[in-house]
Image (cartoon, grey):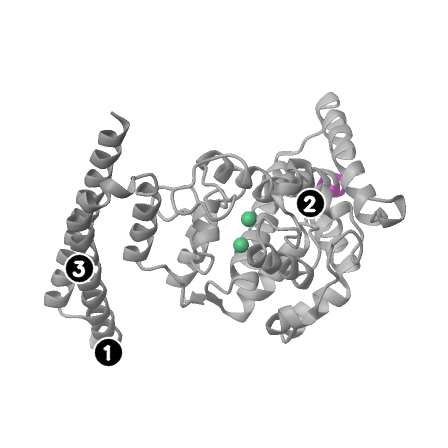
């Protein structure tokens, strides 16, 4: 990359902000200048702006994995701006291209160009140079239709800087700590959120398991979920990007999923998209059986057939149960057959899994 292609405003900020954050923290530690309300508020701001990115920019705006009421959309657009990761429009434009062209030269933050590039290096490149696409509104027309998102885009610099620095400063003024608000809940917090969310493009494409697909570099790891607000289950996400969840098991750390779900119970979000269980299980079986040799494949046929059958029955039972629930509340009879069908599906899944394991150990011996 030539020097003239360097995006100075972003580049200088991304280099200087961590240095400034370390300096601010050193000062506060040395002079014991922390005020507890400010520290608590900084944690709140980290979650609010981080979730603005994961629940807002990512799962709502880029992927439309659920619908949100106007106040929720506004709050996510407002706090998301404070993460200083550009406007909803720019972010979603790049992210949709990331999914569409993942791991190719057209992927804006392709891991194949190196860990550093995927983490932060891609942001140093001026748009329209070195293969970095200019923002094409046609790719985000649906978002452009929203007046508040358009406003956030058109006045992004002022908007973002306000939410990132001035807003926490003004809130902390309530307990007389304006500069603590600006420096701790603003600067230090934004550096943490930056590198947390940047890890989704670097760490989540490098470290972890691939239980759902080998078609892309995305990986699942609970460790990366911890500092990415639950986005660490990235192999699942790339395979099923329409799902509002990234960690699909109830115990998997995905605070973004929990927040979207809680808001749905309060009537503030709706139509949360979940991939059907049988499809998810099918992907897992596909991966597990990848290394079974062609000669051993017939040994899997019977249990595979049973799984397909159970999946079909489960799909029907779910449809009947959901349709009835929508109309007048499902009968306990339909609920019972839905639960039964799910049990059979899991049993068929486990049997196919065992058959695959046997076939693999036989060919390894
Ligand atoms: Zn990705
Ligand atoms: Zn995504």
**Range of residues picked out in magenta:** 175-182
Residue 206 location (% of width, % of height): 54, 36
Query: Residue 64 location, x and y as percent?
Result: 50, 65
- Residues at marks 2 and 3 touching, judged by CB atoms closer than 8 Å: no
Q: What residue is at 86 percent from the left and 44 percent from the top?
A: 2
Q: Nearer the viewer, residue 189 or 224?
A: 224
Left or right: where does residue 212 sit relative to residue 310? right
Q: Residue furthest left?
A: 333
Is-magenta flag for residue 237? no
Q: Which residue is disc 3 drawn over?
A: 309
Tell which circle, 2 or 3, labels the residue nearer the N-terminal end.
Answer: 2
The residue carrying mark 1 is: 327
**Residue 121 vertical position relative to residue 237 in the rendered view, above or below:** above
Pointer 2 local density, CA inside 10 Å: few below 14, some 14–19, many at least 20: many
Rendered image quadrant of residue 205: top right
SS class, disc 1: helix
Tell me the residue that label 2 is attached to.
172
In the image, farthest residue toward the bottom: 327
**In the depicted structure, whether residue 231 falls above or below residue 137:** above
Spot occupied by residue 267 in the image (x, y as percentages of width and height) = 41, 67
């Amino acid at each position: 990359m030539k020097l003239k292609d360097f995006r100075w405003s972003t580049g200088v900020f991304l280099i200087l902000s961590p240095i400034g954050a370390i300096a601010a923290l050193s000062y506060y530690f040395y002079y014991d200048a922390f005020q507890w309300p400010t520290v608590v508020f900084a944690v709140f701001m980290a979650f609010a702006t981080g979730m603005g990115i994961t629940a807002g920019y990512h799962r709502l705006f880029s992927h439309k994995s659920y619908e949100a009421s106007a106040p929720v959309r506004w709050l996510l657009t407002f706090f998301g701006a404070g993460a200083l990761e550009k406007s909803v429009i720019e972010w979603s434009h790049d992210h949709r291209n990331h999914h569409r062209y993942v791991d190719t030269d057209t992927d804006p933050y392709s891991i194949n160009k190196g860990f550093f590039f995927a983490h932060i290096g891609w942001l140093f490149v001026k748009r329209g140079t070195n293969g970095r696409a200019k923002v094409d509104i046609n790719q985000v027309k649906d978002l452009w239709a929203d007046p508040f998102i358009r406003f956030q885009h058109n006045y992004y610099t002022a908007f973002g800087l306000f939410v990132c620095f001035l807003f926490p400063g003004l809130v902390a003024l309530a307990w007389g700590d304006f500069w603590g608000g600006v420096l701790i809940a603003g600067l230090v917090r934004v550096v943490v959120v930056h590198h947390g969310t940047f890890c989704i493009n670097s760490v989540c494409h490098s470290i972890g398991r691939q239980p759902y697909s080998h078609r892309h570099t995305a990986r699942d790891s609970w460790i990366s979920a911890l500092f990415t607000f639950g986005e660490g289950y990235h192999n699942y996400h790339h395979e099923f990007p329409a799902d509002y969840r990234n960690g699909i098991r109830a115990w998997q750390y995905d605070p973004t999923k929990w927040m979207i779900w809680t808001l749905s119970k309060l009537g503030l979000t709706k139509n949360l998209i979940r991939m059907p269980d049988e499809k998810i299980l099918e992907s897992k079986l596909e991966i597990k059986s990848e290394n079974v040799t062609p000669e051993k494949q017939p040994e899997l046929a019977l249990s595979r057939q049973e799984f397909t059958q159970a999946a079909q029955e489960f799909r029907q039972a779910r449809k009947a149960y959901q349709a009835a629930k929508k109309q007048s509340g499902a009968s306990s009879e339909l609920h019972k057959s839905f639960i039964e069908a799910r049990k059979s599906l899991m049993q068929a899944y486990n049997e196919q899994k065992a058959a695959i394991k046997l076939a693999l150990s036989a060919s390894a011996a």
